[in-house]
Image (tube, coloured by chain):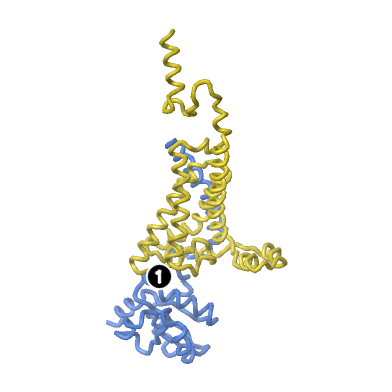
Chain colours: A yellow, B blue
Amino acid sequence: MAQDEEMKRTLISDPHLNPLGAPPGRDPGEDAQHPVRVVSKIVWRIVDVIVGGIFIFAALTKIFDLDHLIADLGHLHLGSIIVDFQNLRLADPVQFANDIDNYKILPWPISVGLAFYLPWLEMFCGLALILRRLYLGGLSILTGLVAVFLVATIAAKVRGLDITCGCFGHASQNWNFPTHLAIDLAILGALLALSFRVVSGTADDPEA
Amino acid sequence: MKSSLVRQALVLAALAFVPGLVQAIYFGDKVSWRSPVPASEMVTVTRARAWGENAIWVDARPDNEFARDHVPGALPLNEDRWSELLPQFLAAWSPEKRVVIYCSSEGCNASREVAHRLRKEAQLKDVFVLEGGWEEWLKTRK
């Protein structure tokens, strides 16, 4: 009986065995309410929303023809924005297929298939981060996509290919290589930070 | 956690497949799955040769490759010196003539890009990309 009590005390006090890490006699919820933890939680949620939003925007620029809308938003032509929404149409996937094909890694039929598929995958994964549903899956897919894209971009540069990113549709067509690289590295960094947080167990239940 | 991650990734991959498929069906007749250029905008060497004087040949390869050798009568028009070479090309062009553009081989991209820009920027209509490019032309020349 005394041995059982001793074991129970050890289990509760050992932070490795007790996932909440709460010392004996302390309310586990008390730790979660700590101001630092609350602020940290809010900051990470903002990172989730920003990263998820970037991928949703990237997907929308490839799925819809947003040229006029982005231009009018940029110039604050508010009157035209409603008209732009009314005239919104699906973008030509050939442009994005050409962007993928320019990397000279995949055969054309696969580039076309990816031109249809990738924007929707980005969209759903971005939503997964924002809504915190299927969070781990979305995070891992996006990290993989950005990593592959980075390697492909660097490889294309090394091979001397003049590639167009296409990552944000027409909005990114005139970006130079260092700009591509800097933005992709920043996104990858944010995704890795989110992944590390989940893996290290410092995150709350990502689906909560 | 690992199995949950894989399961979630598979669910997302499957979810994205559905609208992607619908979009592919919607664009079915507008996108060529076999070649980046629609079949109607491609031309074989034999057919382009048959056009004779009614065709202008355009070499989209870099200047050094054009200087080494090119299709007799072809005009250079590459993206490196686009603004310089385009006026020369337009001076030789006339509406009744078809434009045949080639680059190094089947896998090169320059002829597609030049064709795209001629249609978009110069509003030309009868613009064709040569199947197999310069390599194919060399084979048929022998």
Q: Residue furthest top?
A: A1
Drawn side of residue B45 relative to residue A123, left or right: left
| Quadrant in the picture for the N terminus of chain B | top left
- Looking at the picture, how far across and down is residue A114, in whole percent? 46, 57
- Which residue is located at x 55 percent, y 51 percent? A50
Q: Residue furthest bottom?
A: B91
Q: Which residue is mark 1?
A: A162
- Which residue is located at x 56 percent, y 53 percent? A53
- Which residue is located at x 57 percent, y 47 percent? A46
Residue A186, compared with residue A159, is above or below; it is above
Q: Can you see residue B21?
A: no
Q: Can you see residue A192?
A: yes
Disc 1: which chain?
A
- Looking at the picture, how far across and down is residue A166, in whole percent? 49, 64
Element class at badge 1: loop
- Looking at the picture, how far across and down is residue A85, in whole percent? 67, 62
Q: Residue furthest right?
A: A79
Drawn side of residue A53 relative to residue A1, left or right: right
| Quadrant in the picture for the C terminus of chain B | bottom left
- Looking at the picture, how far across and down is residue B31, in whole percent? 51, 65
Q: How many marks?
A: 1
Drawn side of residue B105 relative to residue A50, left or right: left
Residue A63, compared with residue B72, is above or below; it is above
What amino acid does circle 1 point to? Asp
Q: Nearer the viewer, residue A184 or A83?
A: A184
